[in-house]
Image (cartoon, coloured by chain):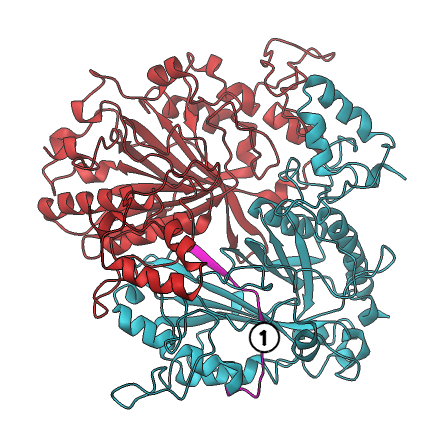
Chain colours: A red, B cyan
């Protein structure tokens, strides 16, 4: 037992508020063993800790937290050994940070004052905030650089061009992605920032995205939230309580592809700019027809309650379907795609304004699935071709990543099975 | 009593969770008078409502909320009457939204389905979340367009050029600013978005900025938070409990300038990009010397506790001041500026990455004060010239705004005294 496991951020805070004596104690504790060195059990709802070790990575079926900081890195070292070392260092830091500790054992206290601190400090007083860190490997990682070409899973396809795509290469792709979700944005930002700090000289930030107001519920205990069009969307999302559905639609099973991905999943990210000013001038009836849902309640236009099953056969007095042929709920519905479902985990974003008098805002869509070839791709192809919503949105970035299974214990690391 | 005052967002939520019957009831309520039509009193800590009406605008001494959405508008109508009408419409919407209601009486329910809804809907299920909306008028509003040139307060100066300024004109200035602060970013975003929607054809969004992790405490009940350098800063901030100090340093008094500003204050905003990757490689001792504070506790280097007064005369074994001559705490300290203080109310920001492998992050500095000529300008001139921190920061945007006094009742509106 060493200092490395000794000081949680919350513990430090607890000492700090004791005043000068407490502050002095922090300094003293930093240099020696603490009694009860492991982090306290955080079970508080929003501030608590999510276990890091497990069969699957956390941050996928974990009830969606309120905030996102997503990053895609380019690997700039060409040495396989340095990449593996980085994944080991990252895993150790992630195991600490998700439990509310600093990224490294000394943080901004107790280390060599002539060295940079091994934590940047801005989350020092904050609880774990249900931070999860979830890693994924992009297709480009499987090129010739690291000898991984023959380990690339067939399901990790390059996404096809979808009609209407307006992708910006600089904010698309990436060798490695990390999704940080937390109930405090400062905690999510801190985590990604420290991974970038640790990766200095080996990886470079390709792009990063902040998100808020989770747009999906991943548990029946969570209410379906609203996107920036003001609608509830993704009502039919996979939920953590549906174990059999998760096995069918989310987790990679033995035999699905290379063994290193068993227990993993695939992530598709799409930054979807919304033309919200145009939307805001569309009549309510048109907005509801486009989604196929009632705006206030989220009910399908054939029902009264959000969770009523849409009746796609029902026609109105004019003989036309009540839920239009080109409505979002119809085109995206599992019944249209042989039952294919996604675990959506997107967030709203506002990136300021676009210089043309409009807010630069939309949806940072994220969806986990067992095989993009059978799930995201056919669903998105249908939407891109027919969805009435396309008049109001534009896909500006895209990425697909293979997310390995969970880290089982302190001897394991992110992607170990890929490199051994 | 009409529907206009009838449906709070939370009330709607309460009905919504009652299921199908509740949902039907919403539809019914939307068209007729509700019993107890005024919003329920929200006194819950983070979700509650802050009173909108008062002698001063809310959002200044209000204990700093967790999230910011700041916007600067260009006025694009040239008609004074349209501008006044807009301010009246905005005030009515702000009075509603800050109390947890939709921006307009019909929101996405109960209005004409062939008209756009008068609320965009994404905050429909959310509590007030201590939303405050605070308006300010920039120097450019006092040009020839609206006949306001002779109403411009002398204290509303154009800020001078400070050494090292790297201002981007497109994200600086603005005719009108609105600061939305709330404990839920979706609520702050919703409020600004609806003001922009209402202003269509009369104003255009010049720039907008999201912020998180308030970097200042405006009440002794709030802990001093940390900026993205990981330090506690602004310990000497003005606090709402210091009524005499607020009168001296914050609120415009009769005789300070034109009468329409009495009870108002001046806001300076500066977007300060932080070179955090460079900072993260600086030794802890250097970081602490630059701030003049201990990183872990926030204590001045001559003290043990955050609120210990810095001793600028104390020297170390080497004969040099313990708190360096070019340290931030020394240069910014009120004792250096004839006691001048600010009410700082800034937020951290992360705008993704900069395309050069770095996070685009920093501090969106906001400070309220009685007279920028005596407060922000001399303090910032000293910092811009000497602060050791300048090696790690860059000011990229700037704005100064005259924030009028509060709206006293439903017959009043933002800036009424300026236009009458």
Q: In which quarter of the image is the N terminus of chain B?
A: top right
Callout 1: chain: B
Would you say residue B89 sits in the magenta stretch? no
Would you say residue B337 sits in the magenta stretch? yes
The magenta region covers B336-352
Residue, x 49% and y 31% (percent of image)?
Answer: A216
Residue A179 picture quarter: top left
Q: In this view, does A291 lie above or below B189?
A: above
B99 on left or right of A148: right
Q: Is residue B364 above or below residue A14?
A: below
Residue, x 70% and y 60% (percent of image)?
Answer: B58
Residue, x 28% and y 29% (percent of image)?
Answer: A54
Q: Position of residue B298 (x, y in %)?
A: 41, 67
Q: Nearer the viewer, residue B115 or B132?
A: B132
A219 on left or right of A414: right
Q: Where is residue B341 in the image (x, y as percent from the top left)?
A: 58, 78
Q: Nearer the viewer, residue A203 or A10?
A: A10
Residue B286 picture quarter: bottom left
On the question of residue A157 being in view, the answer is yes
Q: Which of A166 and B292 is in front in this view?
A: B292
Q: Is residue A165 above or below residue A351?
A: above
Q: Position of residue B398 (x, y in %)?
A: 53, 71
Q: Position of residue A24 (x, y in %)?
A: 35, 65
Residue position marked by numbered label 1 in the rendering: B342
């Amino acid at each position: 037992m060493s200092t490395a496991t000794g000081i949680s951020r919350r513990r430090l805070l607890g000492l700090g508020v004791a005043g000068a004596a407490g502050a002095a104690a922090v300094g003293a504790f930093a240099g020696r063993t603490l009694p009860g060195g492991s982090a306290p059990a955080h079970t508080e709802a929003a501030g608590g800790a999510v276990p890091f070790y497990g069969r699957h990575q956390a941050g996928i079926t974990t009830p969606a937290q309120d905030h996102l900081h997503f990053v895609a890195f380019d690997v700039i070292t060409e040495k396989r050994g340095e990449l593996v070392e980085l994944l080991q260092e990252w895993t150790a830091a992630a195991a600490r940070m998700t439990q509310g500790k600093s990224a490294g054992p000394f943080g901004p206290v107790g280390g060599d004052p002539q060295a940079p601190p091994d934590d940047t400090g801005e989350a020092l007083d904050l609880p774990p905030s249900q931070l999860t860190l979830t890693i994924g490997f992009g297709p480009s990682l499987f090129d010739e650089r690291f000898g991984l070409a023959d380990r690339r899973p067939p399901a990790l396809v390059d996404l096809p061009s979808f009609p209407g795509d307006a992708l910006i290469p600089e904010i698309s792709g990436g060798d490695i992605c990390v999704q940080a979700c937390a109930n405090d944005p400062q905690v999510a930002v801190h985590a990604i920032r420290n991974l970038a700090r640790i990766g200095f000289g080996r990886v470079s930030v390709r792009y990063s995205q902040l998100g808020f107001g989770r747009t999906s519920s991943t548990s029946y205990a969570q209410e379906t939230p609203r996107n920036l069009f003001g609608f509830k969307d993704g009502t039919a999302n996979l939920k953590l309580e549906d174990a059999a559905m998760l096995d069918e639609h989310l987790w990679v099973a033995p035999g699905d592809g290379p063994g290193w991905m068993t227990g993993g999943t695939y992530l598709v990210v799409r930054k979807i700019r919304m033309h919200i000013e145009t939307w805001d001038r569309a009549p309510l009836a048109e907005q509801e027809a486009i989604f196929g849902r009632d705006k206030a309640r989220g009910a399908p236009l054939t029902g009264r309650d959000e969770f009523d099953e849409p009746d796609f056969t029902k026609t109105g007095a004019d003989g036309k379907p009540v839920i239009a042929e080109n409505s979002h709920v119809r085109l995206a519905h599992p019944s249209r795609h042989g039952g294919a479902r996604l675990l959506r985990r997107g967030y709203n974003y506002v990136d300021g304004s676009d210089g043309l008098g409009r807010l630069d805002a939309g949806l940072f869509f994220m969806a986990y699935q067992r095989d993009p070839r059978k799930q995201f791709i056919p669903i998105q192809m249908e939407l891109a071709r027919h969805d009435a919503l396309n008049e109001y949105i534009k896909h500006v970035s895209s990425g697909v990543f293979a997310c390995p299974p969970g880290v089982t214990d302190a001897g394991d690391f992110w992607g170990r099975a890929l490199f051994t």
